[in-house]
Image (spheres, helix red, strand yellow):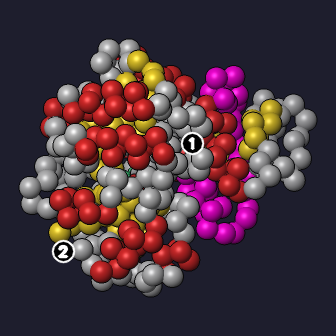
Amino acid sequence: MAITLDCGEESISHAAKSLLEGHLVAFPTETVYGLGADATDEIAVRQIYAVKSRPNNHPLIVHISSVELIDFWAVDLPKYALDLARNYWPGPMTLILKKHSHVSSLISGGQENIGLRIPNNECALQLLRTFENLGGIGVVAPSANKFGSVSPTSSEDVEQELGHLLGKDDLVLNGGQCKLGIESTIVNCLGTKPKILRPGFITENMIEKIIEIARDENQSKNVIKHPGDFKNHYAPKTPVYLNSVASSGDGLIALETVETPENVVRLSSPKSLEEFASNLYKSFRKADQIKLTRIVVILTDQNPIADAIRDRVFKASIKN
Ligand code: TXA
Ligand code: MG
């Protein structure tokens, strides 16, 4: 059972040392909570796969605090990748780059590529900076949930998901509720043009301010594993239905303008799509706790944030 700490200076310092000693530290980011380990410590990285029950051909994102560290992890960067990094980091964007030959293929799931990100969350950045000041070079951090399950957006979610699986020297940093609530945009930067592999808050339009996006499907063929390959992602235990009719015993997630039918439990009534995203996973968890029959999500808007939310809801609904 891990200890939960706040994000004060002392806790961060303790957490950075723990990472260097090979322990796991779950920490908040602006998207979701990550389960962190020293990316250069094979035993700690293996422990991440074990705790999450994650297949080890499923690559991990390395979190860093500064653009200067890219060169340790990746080679042959296209110019546009650096432009994206300089414009949108720290932020909810992961870049897939060609990995440096010295980087363990354990992190990259056996591929020649590496995912990198600078998160935009003060607690995460302080942790990464302190870790790097002590000699660390990067922290692998998948979302702090069991493989295929819903990403945690609070430290309580992490405790509930993984608390019983973490060791007594592992830590959870409590930085409150995550601001965005859905995972980073993943951008494949291996081709002459970038390609979005997972939509998020860094949108197509934002990327196209820097460089045109690849529309040709073949561009990303050299990426073997990516979020779209796995079907039962982001799924609560309660079956999820997108744009279906909610009936008695179901839970409903929809913008506040949508009415709640009789005997349906309103899980969330966000005023905006931003609020929709930040409450989504919490509402999924609540439905599991109160054992609803189904979760119905109504989302018909057509814009990049709605598309990113729909991507998660659609993947959560695939089993049904
Ligand atoms: O917002 C986020 O990205 C959060 C926070 C903690 O940073 N992290 C996160 O990690 O969502 P994870 O492991 O739960 O999801 C990362 C996704 C996985 O589906 C993985 O397949 C993909 O990114 N990925 C990571 N490295 C990759 C690589 N080298 N090539 C292709 N896909 C990669
Ligand atoms: Mg995940």
Circle 1 sits in a helix, a strand or a loop, which is it? Answer: loop
Mark 2, Cα crowd under 10 Å, few <14 / some 14-19 / many 20+, is few
Question: Residue 164 occupies which quadrant of the picture?
Answer: top left
Give the magenta-colored segment's residue range.
286-314
| Residue occupying the point 45% across, 81% down | 210
Mark number displayed over residue 76: 2
Res 54 visible:
no
Crowding at dot 1, Cα within 10 Å, few <14 / some 14-19 / many 20+, comes out as many
Determine the secondary structure under disc 2. loop
264, 193: nearer the viewer: 193
Q: Residue 261: image x %, image y %?
A: 88, 40
Q: Quadrant of the N terminus?
A: top left
Q: Residue 228 at what x, y percent from top left? A: 42, 57
Q: Is 308 colored magenta in this rendering?
A: yes
Rendering coords of residue 318 (x, y %): 53, 48
Q: Which mark is residue 264?
A: none
**For residue 175, above or below residue 116:** above
Locate residue 279 relative to residue 178 in the image: left or right: right
Marks 1/2: CA distance? 33 Å
Left or right side of 107 for 199: right
> Nearest the camera: 56 or 183?
183
Q: Amino acid at mark 1?
A: Cys
Q: Left or right: where does residue 260 sit relative to residue 294?
A: right
Does 251 sit above or below residue 203?
Answer: above
Looking at the rendered image, the quarter that the C terminus falls into is top right
The percent coordinates of residue 169 (x first, y second) are 30, 18
**Residue 86 shows in this picture:** yes
Amino acid at pointer 2: Asp
Upstream in sequence: badge 1 or badge 2: 2
For label 2, being within 8 Å of ligand 1 is answered no
The one nearer the camera, 96 or 259, is 96
Q: Which residue is mark 1?
A: 178
